[in-house]
Amino acid sequence: MRSLIRRRPETGKADPAPSRWSWRMQRLMLTPGFRFALRVGLPFTLSLLAGTIYMADEERRGTVVQAIADVRASIEERPEFMVKLMAIDGASDMLSTEIRTALPLEFPLSSFDLDLPQIREKITDIDGVKQANVRIRPGGVLQIDVTPRVPIAVWRNETGLALVDNTGAHVARIEARRDHADLPLIAGAGASKAVPEALKLIAAANVLGDRLRGLVRVGGRRWDVVLDRDQTIMLPEENALQALERVIALEGAQEVLTRDVARVDMRLAARPTLRMNEDATREWWHIRQLSGQ
């Protein structure tokens, strides 16, 4: 029976087919990931290992760190990066002194050592500063542009006298009222929180001229308008401006505030009340007794 299996002819030539391991290696070399690991990963690993071994020695590590610090210092201390002085624009002499005190910088110093956002934050924390812009100007100048708070009223509180701006923000403390006699006076706890309303009331009361002494915040809810001759206009919590305008209209028509009136109580809009001073009350009782009423 003829054999169905064809036998390889027995010759002296070697088999040209690759071995199993050679075939697997060729297959791996055709894999992108393996080629990347061989080209990048292996050199990186060897370099990292060599660097770790080298930096394991403390003396070598100190030498490298010092060399890096020397290079950085040589760059940071170049003349073009040095800041030699500080310029402040937009602030008064007193406010400029306060800013320089809050920033104890010793010039010259490198611009790399200046934290401009932190400097700006320190400046805006000063009561008299509303806004501030900080930059390094060519020529080695630390330029600070300040928008100061403008005092609009004097606030008398439990700790003394202070200047406030139109938002009620604290500007500065003062020693005496006469130092800012041109500014209106407000008093009472929480008065600085209602400065916008107080300014409207003061503007409306300007028709009274020099008779206006100031405003007093009562209970943190409403205002009393204080005039000379110990007269007070007690305003309601709501619609205070309208109530004050009614009193001013009565003064123009009937001269209510010119009379011996101690209090004008407008807290109840439908029922205004007048309270006479002690002398007028005593005289009124005397007249009633004489008339027999």
Image: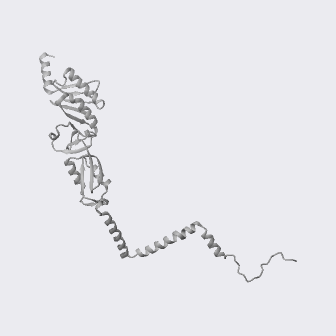
x%, y% of residue 62?
Answer: 35, 73
Residue at 78 percent of width and 80 percent of height:
9
x%, y% of residue 3?
Answer: 84, 77
Residue 230 visible within the image: no
* Depth check, front residue: 202 or 220: 202
The picture quadrant where one finds residue 11 is: bottom right
Q: Residue furthest bottom?
A: 12
* Depth check, front residue: 69 or 250: 69
Q: Residue furthest right?
A: 1
Task: Name the quadrant of the N terminus.
Answer: bottom right
The picture quadrant where one finds residue 171 is: top left
* Depth check, front residue: 113 or 252: 113
**Which colour style is shown?**
one colour
Residue 111 visible within the image: yes
Total labels drawn:
0
x%, y% of residue 178?
Answer: 14, 39
The picture quadrant where one finds residue 75 is: bottom left
Whether 8 is drawn above or below 251: the answer is below
Residue at 19 percent of width and 48 percent of height:
93
x%, y% of residue 83?
Answer: 27, 58
* Depth check, front residue: 196 or 79: 79
Residue at 22 percent of width and 22 percent of height:
250
Task: Name the quadrant of the C terminus.
Answer: top left
